[in-house]
Amino acid sequence: MDQQRLTQISIFDELLRRVRDRAVLCACVLVLLTLVSYVPALDGGFVFDDSMYLTGDARMGTAAGLVEIWTEVAGPDYRHQYYPLTSTAFWLQHQVFGDRPVGYHLVNVLLHALNAVLLWRLLRYLGVPAAWLAAAVFAVHPVHVQSVAWISELKNVLSTAFFLSSALLLVRYLGLGGSEDDGRWRRWPVYGVAVALFVCALLSKTATSLLPVALVLVVWWKRGRVDRRSLLAAAPLAVLGAGFVLMTVYLESSHGGAQGAVFGQTWVERVLIAGRALWFYAGKLVWPAELVFIYPRWTIDASAWWQYVYPLAAVALFGSLWVVRERTGRGPLTAVAYFAVAVVPLAFVNVAFTRYSYVADHWQYWASMGLIALVVGGTAFGWTRWRPSWAPPWSAAPASVLVLVVLSGLTWRRSLVYESPMTLWGDTVARNPDAWAAHGSLGIALAAQGRYDEAISHYLRALVLRPEDADAHNNFGDALQAMGRLEEAIVHYRWALRNDADFAVAHYNLANALRQSGDPEDALRHYRQALRIDPGYVKAHNNFGTALLERGRLAQAAAHFQRAISLDPGHAGARYNLGIARYRQGRIAEAARQFEAALAIDPDFAGARANLAHVMQASAQGAGGS
């Protein structure tokens, strides 16, 4: 090979190395920018339903629990959403982090940073101007704090990582990158990996089912038509997505709490909700002020003419973008259509969270990518095309940096709200005083600190806003019981059960209060009811067993203690109680084993230590006497 040819290859390799080095540097800056913006989130705790998915989920602690995560759908430990890959990620994290929230927060932040990098690569491949800046805005936009700082929303950031990875392979497989296309990507194994990643996205969160629609939109944007190869590529994805959506809708409606009159909107009302939500989300992206964990729930009135302005304005916008597509290009219409496809369907399905509000920041995590790319890319394109002659090419850089600094600062400040349940619900109540669920949750946080009078004031406010709120009545009862006001507590537990007869926790709490007030038979009845509704209720098994033990029904008591232990092997109290039952049955050796097991779990368990010494002494005396 001649020297000139070797020189050309050397120059090419050097240029390729520099491009790669620059890509790595850009990715590292995106990750660093994300980490800096979310530093306060790392100090956050568990909030809202984090306990349901982590600290309160017995499956997280056992290998059998990992199997149940994949095999159990709508069973006794079902958590109202079948997202087994997300639950598996929680299971793995639980083995490493236990009940320390910092590790979970770090994983969420790193996944969000990864999503920003993947979005940058996808936009760059598709030729979107200022792709890196768009990805950076996505990384630090405060509207995403709910998806990142709320541990339970691992399902958002994890599913998006699979979503974007699949999208990257699909656009390469279809050759949508122009000069960057490489024939190596247009092979079936690439498509197979893309489908596998899409399935992983669906197993993490079903909302990622919008990928095939997004793919068709991108094909139309780049080519002006949707060819047969693209349709064939999208069709299996659409079938998979539809299957997961139908399953999720069924589970939400039948087992997830998305039931009752609060979900009884007509189709016309749902159209009004969808139109309003579209503009609401766009507004929060453009001007991210007054972000709230629970937004006010709109009053939807099909007889009010002004409520039709929102959907009609959306139709007018789409019509305008269609008319001017030859002059502006198909990009704006594609971006807005993607945004709409990502948020509008939520108005037409029953989701448990909509009992609180029709909109939530975490519901536009995927949708935001479309509008961010449009606004940032469109601004960059316009500046490049119409930049004044006196302005240097880099003159837009200071403005870009300023935007990122401002957004990063807003994200930092918003992340502080997720420090604890107290800060989260205090902020929510301050911004949305009519959020009944926030008042109830703030009451729980105050009660946990022993501030019962303040807690009761928020429970009362929740009941004024929503008199049928069984949770508020139950929590009100808890506060009263902690204050020693048993009779009043019993009244509120009964009110909770009038509003929700299958409220297992209220049955359990009422049973405890009745037992304390001297009504053991009624207490036993409510323990039975709690366990009929929730056979895996560990505390109910343990306390039911204790109540039976007090009545001298030793065999039945022991059976419930054993059930509690089988459900939660680390329950020291149940082992201690089983030891008491076995001792009274004359089974001294087994009693000693249970007291030893309780001490192994909790070395400071004074009762177990005292009783172990007692049974050992009794055993020694028995042996000496014989």
Image (spheres, rainbow, N blue to C red):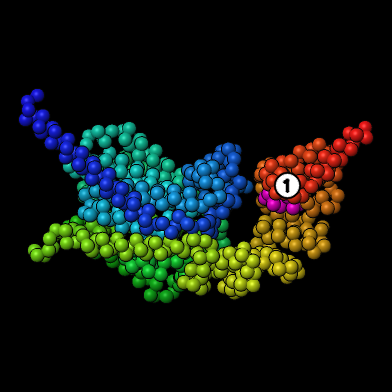
In this view, the residue in front, 218 or 126, is 126
Magenta stretch: give its range. Answer: 537-544
Q: Is residue 467 visible?
A: no
* Circle 1 residues within 10 Å: few <14, some 14–19, many ≥20: many
Magenta stretch holds residue 539: yes
Check the picture and name the quadrant holding the C terminus: top right
Give left or right: position of 258 versus 272.
right
- What residue do we see at 43% from left, 59% from top? 40
Quarter occupied by residue 147: bottom left
User: From what the image shows, is residue 95 above or below residue 32?
Assistant: above
Image label count: 1
Q: Is residue 574 visible?
A: yes
Image side of residue 100 versus residue 126, left or right: right
Element type where label 1 sits in the image = helix
Mark 1 sits on what residue? Answer: 574
Q: Please tell me which residue lies in front, 471 or 409.
A: 409
In percent of width and height, residue 257 lies at 56, 57
Residue 95 covered by magenta stretch: no
The residue nearer to you, when weighing 94 against 369, is 94
Q: Residue at x 59, y 40 (%)?
A: 62
Residue at image location 75% in from the left, 62% down from the top = 513
Q: Nearer the viewer, residue 106 or 325?
A: 106
Q: Residue 595, how many percent across, how many down?
A: 76, 43
Q: Amino acid at mark 1?
A: Ala
Q: Main secondary structure of the magenta part?
A: helix
Residue 415 position, x and y percent, is 43, 61
Taking 183 as reference, is 387 above or below it?
below
Task: Name the spot of residue 468 as percent of width and height, x first.
Answer: 62, 68
- Quadrant, the N terminus: top left
Residue occupying the far right of the picture: 625
Q: Is residue 380 left or right of residue 265?
A: left
Furthest residue toward top: 1
